[in-house]
Structure formats: C-alpha cells, structure tokens
Image (tube, rainbow, N blue to C red):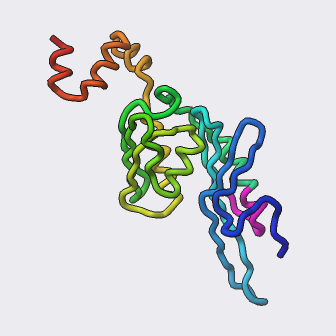
Amino acid sequence: MARAPGRDRGGRDREERDSEFTEKLVHINRVAKVVKGGKRFGFAALVVVGDLKGRVGFGHGKAREVPEAIRKATEAAKRSLLRVPLRDARTLHHDSEGRHGSGKVVVRSAPAGTGIIAGGAMRAVFEMLGVHDVVAKSLGSTNPYNVVRATFDALKHQENPRAVAARRNKKVSEIVSRRRDGSAAGEAAAEA
C-alpha cells in the first residue's frame, strides 16, 4: 500500500491548512471484519478542526482507506463547529467541567506563559481552538472519543462576561472584579 503524501509514520499529528481551518488527526483505529477469504480491514479516524481564533469542531469518519476516513472526519468536523469565547485571545474565561459517558474533564484558565498543560486528545482541541494558556485534567475514560466529547462539553459551558452581565442586568466590571477576587468574601464585599 502506497503511503499518502503529507502523512507522517504514526499517522498522528497530521496538520493541514484548508482555507481558514487547520486540521489535526487525533486518533486512527484499524478494525478487521473476518470474511470467507480472510480479513477485511477498515479505518476509523477522529479529527479536530479549528481556525485558531475561537472556533473548533470534531468529526469521526470511517472508510476502507485511511485518507478517505480522514477526509470524511474532516468534513464532519467542519459541519459541527463550536464558537468558544476566549479571554485576551489566549485563555478561557473561567474554569469548567465536562463529561461524556465515563470520561470527565476539568479545564481551568491560566495566567500568561503557562502554555497548554493537557494530554493527547485534549491538547489537540486546545491547539485548534487557539488557546495558548490552559490547565486541563482528564479523569475517568482514556478513550480519545470520550475525552474529546467531554472537552467539547466543558467548552460549551464557557460564557463571555458581557453575556453574563447582560443576563443579570449588571455591569461587566462587577462580573470581572468578582472573577479576580475569586473568594466568597470578595463576592460579599461586592454585594454590599
């Protein structure tokens, strides 16, 4: 079988520029179906796509050949894009948790210079999202599909301070000052 151009040996960390989006292959799975003449192999690919500016999506594709599976997964990822509000275009606004099945993740905003502290599948999501500083921990399932879905669940809970302020009929400065204090005493002082 000839190797597809632009693929590295392990098939992982495949990045490709396509218009405004960058894609990253997170996981590839080979499955075998036993038939009369022997085994028939198929491939399943998990791809994360993002514009590095706050939009990210993931997709799953299956096919008999690896490039076709990756193409299908990329198309599925572009159809399921999620916009995530970022603070200073480098980190998340607040901490959040997400879960899918037995996979649970905790994502936390981080100060400048921290970098992306996250493992495998979560790292790919944050890189494609354009986050530069984040601390994340995956608990429970190590299955990349569950970890990616749990990460997206955590990102769906991210809210912009402007939206929160509008919903509560408060000023943005009140919401942001509470975030900086981070303690119940700070909240009580702001209420008084």
Which of the pair 187/69 is nearer the observer? 187
Q: Where the C terminus falls, by quadrant?
A: top left
Residue nearest the viewer, comparing 183 with 36: 183
The answer to which quarter of the image holds residue 102 is bottom left
Q: Nearer the viewer, residue 71 or 107?
A: 107
Q: Position of residue 62 (x, y in %)?
A: 70, 62
Quick check: 78 above or below 166? below
> Does residue 17 appear left or right of residue 145 in this picture?
right
In this picture, residue 69 sits left or right of residue 162: right
**The magenta stretch spans which residues?**
60-70
Residue 39, image x, y percentages: 72, 84
Q: Quadrant of the N terminus?
A: bottom right
* Residue 46 image-quadrant placement: bottom right
| Labels in figure, total | 0
Q: Is residue 68 magenta?
A: yes
Q: Residue furthest bottom?
A: 37
Rendered residue at 66%/64% (across/down): 44
Question: On the picture, is 18 further left or further right than 163?
Answer: right
The residue sitting at 46% across, 27% down in the picture is 87
Q: Foreground: 146 or 115?
A: 115
In the image, is residue 15 part of the stretch drawn in magenta?
no
Query: Residue 129 at x, y = what percent?
Result: 57, 39
Q: Residue at x 75, y 44 (%)?
A: 17
Residue 120 screen position, x and y as percent: 51, 58
